Image (spheres, rainbow, N blue to C red):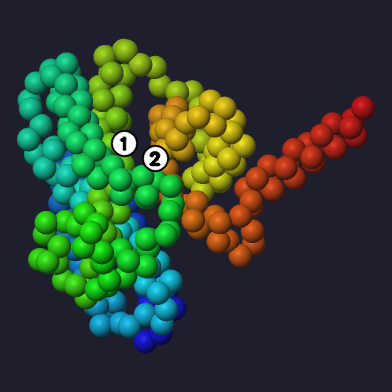
Amino acid sequence: MVTKTIFRKITALEEKLRESIKQFHDQEPDIVKVAEKCLIIIDSITRQVKNLVSNHIFEDIGEEVYFFKHMKPVFISKFIYYSSILELESRLPHAGKKTLKKFYENEQEKLKSFYEQHSEFYSYYRRDATYLDHKIFVRNSYDLKMKLSSGFYNFDLSFTTSHDHLISHFIATQDYEQYLKKQIASISEEAGNQPLSPLVWSGSKSGLVELVYGLYQMRCFNGGNIELSEVIKFVEKSLSLDLGNFHKTIFEIRNRKQGPTKFLQMVNDNLIQHFNNMDDFR
C-alpha cells in the first residue's frame, strides 16, 4: 500500500474521531463520562492507524517525518488529554467555588515543571525547527546524546520514534491548559468576577490563525518582542475559543495548493469591494 493511500485513510480516521468526540460532547453533559467514551474510541482508532503504519516502509524520510511529527500526535495527544481530564475530574473536591478555583490553579502549576523538564525540545517544537527531524521522527534513528524518555525501550519501535510522544504531550498539555483556564474562568464568571466577552469569532479557526500569524510576522505585537504562543493564548482568552494545535494549522496554511494567504486575500478583496461600494453612493 503506497504512502498516499495510507495518509488518506489516516485523514479519514482523524475526521471520524473528531466527529465522534464532538458527538460525545454534544450529547453528554458529564465530562467524566465524555472522557471515558472518548478514550474508548481514541484507542480503537489509534489501533487502526497503528495497523496501517507499523509494517509500512515509507518511500522517503520526509513522509515518515510528516507522519510521526504531525499525524500520529493528533491521535495520541487526544488520548493523553482525555486521560488527564478523567483523572482530574474524578478527584474534583466537593467544595465551594474558592476551593475549586484553587484546585484548578494548582493543576496549572504542575504543568510548569513539564515545560521546564523539556524546555530545550519545547523550544525546538515551538520554533517549528526541522534540523533534527531526520533523527528524532524516523524509526530506529535516534541520537543517544539527546535526552530520551526513560520508557523508550518499552515502546513498540515499529510505531514509535524517539520524540513523537513528546509532540503528543505538548499538544495535549496545551489543550489541557486551555481546559483548566476555561474551568477557572467559568468559576470566576459565576462569582461575578469576570464578564463574558461580547465578541464571538464566527469565521474559521484557520482563518484566525492566518490573520494572527500574519500580524505576528509583521511584528505588530510588542514590537516583535513576544512569543507567538503568547499571542495565540491572548486571542484564545479574549475570544473564549480554542485554536488547538496552531503549529499544525500554520504548517497546513503554508502548504496550501491555492496559496498560504487565502483568508487574508478574502479580507483584502472584501475591504476593497466595501470601499468601492461607498464610492458608488457618493
The C terminus - image quarter = top right
Q: Residue at x 7, y 25 (%)?
A: 94
Residue 146 image point, x, y percent: 24, 57
Q: Residue at x 30, y 24 (%)?
A: 185
Instruction: State how many labels appear.
Output: 2
Q: Nearer the viewer, residue 57 or 26?
A: 57
Q: Residue at x 13, y 38 (%)?
A: 88
User: Residue type at mark 1?
Assistant: Gln
Residue 226 image point, x, y percent: 47, 31
User: Residue type at mark 2?
Assistant: Asp
Tag of residue 242: 2
Q: Residue at x 65, y 45 (%)?
A: 264
The N terminus - image quarter = bottom left
Q: Earlier in the sequence, mark 1 or mark 2?
A: 1
Q: Nearer the viewer, residue 257 or 182?
A: 257
Q: Note whether 265 is above or below 62 in the view shown.
A: above
Residue 280 image point, x, y percent: 90, 34
Res. 164 image quadrant: bottom left
**Along the horizontal axis of the image, is 88 left or right of 61?**
left
**Along the horizontal axis of the image, is 270 left or right of 35?**
right
Disc 2 is placed on an element classified as: loop
Res. 84 image quadrant: top left
Q: Is residue 192 visible?
A: yes
Q: Note whether 18 is above or below 175 in the view shown.
A: below
Is disc 2 surrounded by few (<14), some (14 to 19) or many (20+) residues within 10 Å?
A: some
